Image (tube, coloured by chain):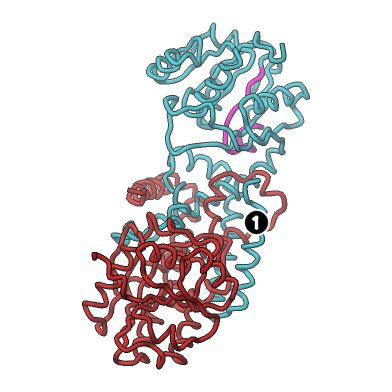
Chain colours: A red, B cyan
Amino acid sequence: MIVDVSKKILIVGLGLLGGSYARILKRFGFPISAITKEQSSIDYALKEGIIDTGATAIDETIIGEADLVIFALYPHVFVDWIAQNQHLLKSGAIITDVTGVKRSIVYQIQDMLREDVEFIAAHPMAGREVSGVENSTDKMFQGANYIVTPTDKNTPEAIHTCLELGRLLGFSNVTTLSPEDHDEMIGFLSQLTHCIAITLMTCNDKENMEKFTGDSFRDLTRIARINDLMWSELFVANKDVLLNQMDMFMDQFQKLKSMLETEDIDGMRKMMRHSTARRALFDKK
Amino acid sequence: MIVDVSKKILIVGLGLLGGSYARILKRFGFPISAITKEQSSIDYALKEGIIDTGATAIDETIIGEADLVIFALYPHVFVDWIAQNQHLLKSGAIITDVTGVKRSIVYQIQDMLREDVEFIAAHPMAGREVSGVENSTDKMFQGANYIVTPTDKNTPEAIHTCLELGRLLGFSNVTTLSPEDHDEMIGFLSQLTHCIAITLMTCNDKENMEKFTGDSFRDLTRIARINDLMWSELFVANKDVLLNQMDMFMDQFQKLKSMLETEDIDGMRKMMRHSTARRALFDKK
């Protein structure tokens, strides 16, 4: 056996991400259980055969049997869950997560967690504009990044297990970063990017613009359709980094505006050539 | 005959746009000539059968025979061309363009133009990240907008001809706007959008970011690969409108930043819900 399917996996929070985890891991033959709020999600997952058992409330048997627990919850819900239910976890269990910010979660969970359970954090960088287990897919992570963020408290074994999990899930790029490096990177590439999109989408309410909209504007505002509950929580959880990134962006935007005011064509062309050269680095390989 | 293919069409500037015009109009059977800088562009277009004749310098016969002349040039090159060569145009000819800004071009050309030739301006809102007639395609304008910007000096006949041209070219949406409304719309939907993309692409030169880049960042920076000569000219030509749009964007971005600083979750969620609702208007129909 290459994959040890005697390990029991529990997914807490069976939405788009948790559902996709279940769908993919089930193909390998793991026993999969789920705890989630809605009975309809459990019913759907059982019917699809992507979980073996499920519950909508705390279930001591399900939790106590799991070797690997994946939390696919909002950050504060995850923290509350651990505070209230960690005594039910199996001794020796490994737990991981999908949270989009790391510093504020990783140390808090590791500090409160029992000594005989290990939390190794991970961020699957994937999403869609739809939600729910009904939209989960086994292609969800193709082309995407999976970042494990270990700390001094983590063992090589748990880090290894978490990296293996990312590879089993089909991520194209599985890697590690410190929680600090992760949050700086995500502050720029994801959070600042969302800030810009929602600002562009809300800064001009002139009517009938949509009649003339082309692909450029649509591309810049695709992510302006946003889960307000989750993203406002993630922004605040990474506040220091994100504010710094917003300042960097505003400084550069102001520089461009000043060049336009003075009709500094050479300066604008220089910035555009810098932009063009740097964008080439970011093409899909 | 539904289409009057006795009309001779001249395209000045045989690049991506001019080449696509030629390719599509040739399918209807129009006699098409081209004047452009590079002999290789003429050779390619003749070999492909998308023009009947071409020249790399001013050609009195070609110009004097054309009933419809399409200028696919940079704005200042277009103005210079008219100043120097308009005496060669056929009496009764209609001329049109592809320029991305309108106020600064339309009135200037109409003011200097001979009485017996009419300029009706248009903006084909389409582009690609590649250039040259070799990349032209007959699918170039599917899903795109074609905006005719008439003034008091235009006749109903010329406006009608220009609208027909947009429809023959296969644009999905063919409409008219005043030069002023056009420039305000384009200042927001296209120019501000490009300003944001090049700012995001150049505000943080940290290395190795590309390893973690997902679709969101790629979407927001696709147009950060930009023709610096053309766009700096277009920005300056629409300076007053664009500066105003940049201010509107900065005010809203600053508002979001202030809410994050004070952890005003309700305020951020309200902006995100506004963003989500407004983005729905802009989905492709």
Q: Which residue is mark 1?
A: B280
Q: Position of residue B166 (x, y in %)?
A: 65, 28
Against B147, is A276 above or below?
below
Please state the extent of the stretch shown in magenta in the rendering.
Answer: B94-106
Q: Which x, y percent locates residue A56?
A: 55, 80
Q: Nearer the viewer, residue A202 or A257?
A: A202
Do we see residue B164 in this rendering? yes
Q: Amino acid at mark 1?
A: Ala
Residue A109: % across, % down? 38, 86
Q: Residue at x 62, y 78 (%)?
A: B266
Q: Is residue A251 visible?
A: no
- Name the residue: 56% across, 78% down: A37
Residue shown at 48% from the left, 62% from the top: A127
User: In terms of image quadrants, where is residue B163?
Assistant: top right
Q: Is residue A215 above or below residue A71?
A: above
Mark 1 belongs to chain = B
Residue in the image at 53% along x and 31% along y:
B140
